[in-house]
Amino acid sequence: MMEEKKNETLLEIKDLKVSFPVHKKWLPAVDGVSLEIHPGEITGIVGESGSGKSVMSQSILRLRDHDTAVRYEGEILFEGENLLQKPLSQMRDIRGNQISVIFQDPLNSLSPVHTVGNQISEVLILHKQLSKEEAGKRSIQMLKMTGIPDPEACMKKYPFELSGGMQQRVMIAMALACEPKLLIADEPTTALDVTIQEQILHLIRDLNERLGMSVLFITHDMGVVSRICHSVKVMYLGQVVEEAQTQELFENPCHPYTQGLLACIPHLRVERGKELPMIQGSVPSLSNIPEGCHFCTRCSLADDTCRNCPPPLVEISPGHKVKCWKYADGSKEREVTAS
Ligand SMILES: Nc1ncnc2c1ncn2[C@@H]1O[C@H](COP(=O)(O)OP(=O)(O)O)[C@@H](O)[C@H]1O
Ligand SMILES: [Mg+2]
């Protein structure tokens, strides 16, 4: 079934640019990102803090429109319709119904003054017009599906009475209550202990397989990517610098930034007989975006071309793209592999 759906596109982002006004100038937190999400796929976005992952994913649901001035360019097509042109009133019908989102900190998204049962039921009453009783029954089913041991008891609790792992399960139950076509998960396991993290990843993967729901999975952790994502985009300072199927990216990481992220996973540090370079420093702020390649200030291979001219995103093998001058022409590619 997944095979025949493969070519359909659920979400297509075309050359998205999202800018904020900083000192009277519009600065791009997302700078020309394109991506496609197909039904049933888990697409990963990976990059350090400050790469623009959250701004990009929140733009899909226009979550920042209320509290900050923001300028969008490009297109976000969900089942062919441009979400950037929808009035916010229509976005409310899409949020939680067609596209759901879960965040790092579930307590920020759960209401402290309502029980778990009331919060999940409310979503179902609002979007699916269920009666209170039907919504209650369905809420219990949802909690059960996320592996909460005593769903009936959980329904009566307030979020603060639950552990972090249980709160995240409640968030997931709420996010999936209306069977959205797309789940956006923005660092959903970052705040959790390793064992709980593992359980939540397993849960998301399991729900993806059982329900065929697409997932946009955001993380700063390459180890997490390897366990859950079918394909990956590596983001740096607002741009996708490398993209590939997960296995291909891990076997053949090309961008110096990707190699640096992989070097953070201890058992992968020595790759094909050479040590992967660690990245020094941190992501520059939006007011310090370099002229040429965004990564040039931290790249040990950067030369004048890199500092002055933005590199193109080049497809080096089917589905594997790299935005680095070293791959933009054949001669430089040899240099990199040799160094
Ligand atoms: N409202 C805003 N005004 C100005 N800059 C912002 C705003 N929101 C986010 N940014 C900047 O956008 C960049 C990307 O942020 P974010 O998407 O949160 O990164 P990530 O999720 O990858 O850590 C950061 O430099 C951040 O400071
Ligand atoms: Mg973020």
Image (cartoon, helix red, strand yellow):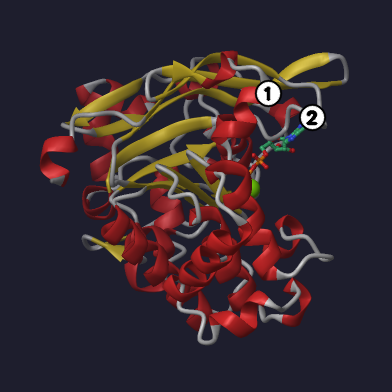
Circle nearer the viewer, 1 or 2: 1
Residue that badge 2 annotates: 66
Using residue 33 as the reference point, say whether residue 251 is left or right of it.
left
Q: Residue furthest right?
A: 23
**Numbered badge on residue 88:** 1
Label 1: element kind: helix
Label 1: few (<14), some (14–19) or many (≥20) C-alpha neighbours in 10 Å: some
- The kind of residue on which mark 1 rests is Leu
Between the residue at mark 1 and the residue at mark 2, the CA separation in whole angstroms equals: 9 Å
- Of 18 and 281, nearer the camera is 18
- The kind of residue on which mark 2 rests is His
* Up/down of 263 relative to 48, above or below: below
Circles 1 and 2, Cβ within 8 Å, touching? The answer is yes
* Up/down of 337 relative to 202, above or below: above
The structure residue drawn at horizontal position 53% and vertical position 21%, both measured from the top left corner, is 83
* Up/down of 183 relative to 160, above or below: above
* Percent coordinates x, y for residue 336 in the rendering: 29, 39
The structure residue drawn at horizontal position 58% and vertical position 38%, both measured from the top left corner, is 95
